[in-house]
Image (cartoon, grey):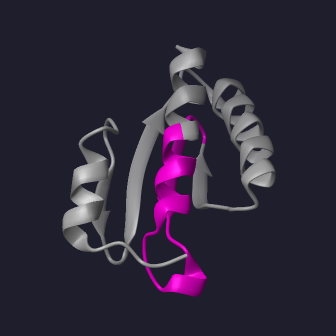
Amino acid sequence: MSKLTEIEIEKHLKTLSGWNFKDNAIHTEFEFKDFKDCFSVMSRIAFECEALNHHPDWANVYNTLNISLSTHDANGVTLKDIELAKAIEDIIDEQE
């Protein structure tokens, strides 16, 4: 899969809420009511990642989840990252 240009990335980010591009990856942060809600969403995202065979760099502190997506083989953002970001957005929308 080929790396997207910055212009292509920015175009895709217009369809995603709260994501930004920096350091060769797209990033977002979500805040939940508590740790249990955060971990529940992380578990749902993990199943989606396995289905897509594409995995995020992420960190969780109590009720906050930080996610960075890039395709390491391409050394940047590809359509795989955009697809996973959209799937994550769908999971978050269902949670709310």
Q: Residue at x 77, y 38 (%)?
A: 43
Residue drawn 34% across the image and 39% down it: 16
Decide: is 77 above or below 9: below
Q: Nearer the viewer, residue 50 or 8?
A: 8
Task: Give the residue displayed 23% in from the left and 52% down from the top.
Answer: 11
Image location (x, y in percent) of residue 96: 52, 13
Relative horizontal placement of residue 48, taking residue 16 as reference (left or right) = right
Is 24 in front, or is 40?
Answer: 24
Q: Position of residue 66 (x, y in %)?
A: 49, 51
Check if residue 64 falls in the magenta segment: yes
Q: Is residue 34 left or right of residue 66?
A: right
Above or below: residue 5 compared with residue 58: below
Q: Quadrant of residue 5?
A: bottom left
User: For the point 31% across and 40% down, which residue is it?
Assistant: 18
Q: Quadrant of the N terminus?
A: bottom right
Query: Which corner quadrant of the image does residue 38 belong to?
Result: top right
How many badges with numbers are in the image? Answer: 0
| Image x and y of residue 65, in percent | 54, 44
Residue 33 within the magenta-colored segment of the rendering: no
Residue 14 is situated, as x and y percent measured from the top left of the image, at 23, 42
User: Farthest residue toward the left?
Assistant: 7
The magenta span reads 62-86
Of residues 14 and 20, the one drawn nearer to the viewer in this rendering: 14
Residue 32 versus residue 44 in the image, above or below? above
Q: Nearer the viewer, residue 40 or 35?
A: 40
